[in-house]
Image (cartoon, helix red, strand yellow):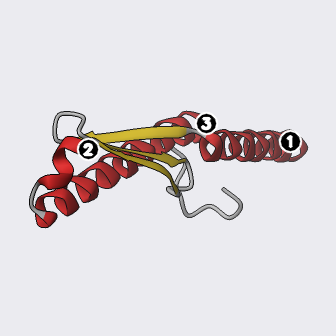
Amino acid sequence: NMKKLMKQAKDMQNKMMETQKELESMEIEGSSGGGAVKVVLNGKKELLSINIDSEILNDDKEILEDLIITCINQAQNEIDKISKDKMGAISGGLPSGLPGF
């Protein structure tokens, strides 16, 4: 039985590693200002691109900065949610403190 349990643990660890790679390759978009500012982050939360509608470039600098921050935070929150959902489905609610998981 211990051998079977170890195999199951190894299989789960492999699934988690595959899922982690999948998550890292994702591209998530965040937007604000009615789509006037858009960012794309990968699953590692690295900024891949930013698109700012030229019409808002004449707006107040602080407003534009706030819109950019909002986009990035929105995309990061979405990445966290997707990651939690996918990893939770694999672990089946195992305690996060288990070594190797």
**61 or 67: nearer the viewer:** 61
Give the percent coordinates (x, y) of residue 94: 55, 47
Give the percent coordinates (x, y) of residue 26: 58, 39
Q: What's the CA distance linking mark 1 and mark 3?
A: 15 Å
- Report whether 40 appears left or right of 32: right
Above/below status of 89 relative to 7: above
- Report whether 19 appears left or right of 35: right
Instruction: Quickly name the residue at label 1.
Output: 7
- Residue name at image x 11 percent, y 55 percent: 59
The quarter in which the N terminus is drawn is top right
The type of residue carrying mark 2 is Ser
In this orientation, does residue 17 appear? yes
Q: Quadrant of residue 81?
A: top left
The type of residue carrying mark 3 is Ile
Which callout, 2 or 3, points to the residue nearer the camera? 2
> Which structural element holds mark 2?
helix
The type of residue carrying mark 1 is Lys
**90 or 18: nearer the viewer:** 18
- Residue name at image x 17 percent, y 60 percent: 66
Q: What's the CA distance linking mark 2 and mark 3?
A: 44 Å
> Which structural element holds mark 1?
helix
Instruction: Quickly name the residue at label 3.
Output: 90
Instruction: Quickly name the residue at label 2.
Output: 54
The quarter in which the C terminus is drawn is bottom right
